[in-house]
């Protein structure tokens, strides 16, 4: 069996961050996605789908810090069926997404929710289970830089602008 969902859309509300008694972060939010198609008569139609999602661990904290209503995101995760009993005693259910990978698609400064120094385009991986999380893999140490050579003067190049093909 395979359960994989990939959605691109805009957040329908600000991220709601909570912490479980274990100290693990949990964020809930919603995404709106659009689909444009032609109906039987050939007229353009738009269909909007609203889906709730859950993000766990460090990714939940990052989402809360950088994302706001209207932020454009890519979500990768799995479809889950949430079931509960409402206040009137009726059984309720809905499908939602448990996010395993979240990527911010807004450019720096495009969305007011971003703060100075926020990444322009970043992905945050989620663990498979959602019950525990690990830090992203550490970046490998930069290679030792070679000793700097004294700067050499570059030769000048004589190019006629009419010879440039673009």
Image (cartoon, rainbow, N blue to C red):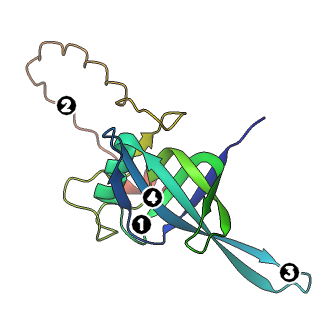
Q: What element carries label 4?
A: strand
Tell us which disc is closer to us: 3 or 2.
Answer: 3
Question: How far, Cα to Cα, is label 3 from label 2?
Answer: 62 Å
Q: Which residue lies most toward the front here?
A: 89
The crowding category of the residue bearing disc 4, from other C-alpha atoms within 10 Å (few below 14, some 14 to 19, many at least 20), is: many
Question: How far, Cα to Cα, is label 1 from label 4?
Answer: 14 Å
Residue of label 2: 154
- Residue 39 is tagged as 3
Disc on the earlier residue, 2 or 1: 1
Disc on the earlier residue, 3 or 1: 3
Depth check, front residue: 28 or 110: 28
Residue at the location (36% across, 30% down)?
A: 136
Residue of label 1: 71
The crowding category of the residue bearing disc 3, from other C-alpha atoms within 10 Å (few below 14, some 14 to 19, many at least 20), is: few
Residue of label 4: 28
- Residue 99 is tagged as none
Q: Is mark 3 on a helix, strand or loop?
A: loop
Residue at the location (33% across, 57% down)?
A: 64
Residue at the location (55% across, 72% down)?
A: 87
Q: Which residue lies most toward the right here?
A: 40
The answer to whether residue 82 is left or right of residue 69 is right
Q: Which residue lies most toward the left here?
A: 150
Disc on the earlier residue, 4 or 2: 4
Q: Is mark 1 on a helix, strand or loop?
A: loop
The crowding category of the residue bearing disc 1, from other C-alpha atoms within 10 Å (few below 14, some 14 to 19, many at least 20), is: many
Image coordinates of residue 146 in percent, x first then y, are 18, 13
Contact, mark 3 vs mark 1 (Cβ under 8 Å): no
Image coordinates of residue 121 in percent, x first then y, are 39, 51
Tell us which disc is closer to us: 4 or 3.
Answer: 4
């Amino acid at each position: 069996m395979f359960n994989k969902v990939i959605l691109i859309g805009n957040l329908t509300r600000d991220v709601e961050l909570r912490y479980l008694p274990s100290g693990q972060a949990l964020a809930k939010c919603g995404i709106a996605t659009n689909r444009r198609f032609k109906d039987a008569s050939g007229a353009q139609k738009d269909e909007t789908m609203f889906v709730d999602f859950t993000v766990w661990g460090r990714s939940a904290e990052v989402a809360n810090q950088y994302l706001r209503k209207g932020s454009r995101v890519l979500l990768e995760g799995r479809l889950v069926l949430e079931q509960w009993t409402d206040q009137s005693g009726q059984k309720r259910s809905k499908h939602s997404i448990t996010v395993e990978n979240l990527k911010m698609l807004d450019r720096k400064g495009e969305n007011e929710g971003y703060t100075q120094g926020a990444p322009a385009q970043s992905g945050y991986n989620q663990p498979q289970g959602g019950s525990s999380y690990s830090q992203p893999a550490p970046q490998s140490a930069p290679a030792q830089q070679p000793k700097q050579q004294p700067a050499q003067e570059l030769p000048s190049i004589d190019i006629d602008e009419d010879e440039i093909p673009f």
